[in-house]
Image: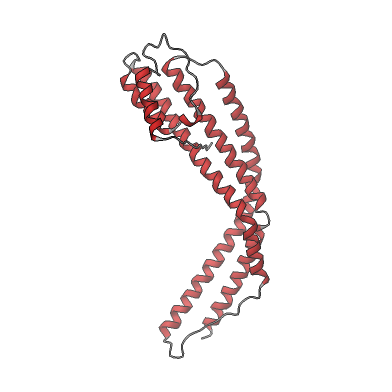
Amino acid sequence: MQKIVPGVRSSFSILFFGLLLLASGAWGQDPEQDQAQPDPPEADLTVESIQARITALDGMPAVDEATKAQIRAILKDTLEELKSASDASSQADALEQEAAAAPAMLVQIRKELASPAPAPGVGLPPDATQAQVDQQLQQAEQALAAARDLFDQLRDEQVRRGERRTALDEQISAAAEHLGELDDALNAPSEAGPLGEARRLQLLAQRRATRQENRALTAELANYDARRELLPARIDRGSRRVTLAEQALAAWQTL
């Protein structure tokens, strides 16, 4: 399941957080005396802060190598969750922006469709060479192929969206269920010590990624609703452009 998240933090606060880990023993120099640490602020759960924790492992002689290996693996997975969250957040942003632009684009397309179709032109100077004619003919053939390709893509998109809407309902429901499971895990008593802290950071990153994934899925569904009338209009425009390209090619072929 794809996931995503934003992480914002100044370089000063990152440096301070990393130094604090090393200086105060945030991982704990004595695992038997460690107590569960409070969750970091949302802004502190970043790629930089997790990388600082991985680096800090080398300065923890009280933790055995086998445990360090476990912690590194967990923190590396945490980094992947944070990256997934960031990717999903960007995807959601793009979908929301696209949906917001749909009404203006629909007006533009309808205006184009309402205007008279231009007559195909074959403007060439009287002294045009056969090579120039052949070049224009080739360009007309390429324009027709591109128009047909776009038209086919739009019709395929119409079918894909119908299938995708059904899948989205299921994926949004599954993401919401997974969020509930992660919340339950985070509300349960936490294991103390560096290993327990790493596992909790992993859960926090998974929750962020799942939230952003759910946001992206919801934005995709809303995007389809906002652009419900836009796709048929684009298909109509695509059909018209295919016809115009066919007429233009025919005009060049008669020369």
Q: Quadrant of residue 78?
A: top left
Whether residue 4 is situated above or below residue 184 in the rendered picture: below
Whether residue 215 is situated above or below residue 25 in the rendered picture: below
Task: Give coordinates of residue 24: x percent, y percent.
Answer: 37, 17
Task: Give coordinates of residue 43: x percent, y percent.
Answer: 48, 31
Whether residue 183 is situated above or below residue 216 in the rendered picture: above
Farthest bottom residue in view = 126
Give the tally of numbered discs: 0
**Residue pictured at 57% horizontal, 41% vertical:** 216
Q: Quadrant of residue 177?
A: top right
Q: Which of 22/156 is in front? A: 22
Identify the coloring: secondary structure
Q: Which of 158/199 is in front? A: 199
**Residue pictured at 61% horizontal, 77% vertical:** 118
**Residue pictured at 55% horizontal, 22% vertical:** 186
Task: Give coordinates of residue 22: x percent, y percent.
Answer: 35, 21
Left or right, 167 with respect to 68, comes to right
Left or right, 199 with respect to 30, comes to right
Q: Which of 148/12 is in front? A: 12
**Residue pictured at 55% horizontal, 45% vertical:** 93
Q: Which of 166/197 is in front? A: 197
Farthest front residue in view = 12
Quadrant in which the N terminus is drawn: top right
Whether residue 218 is situated above or below residue 60 in the rendered picture: below
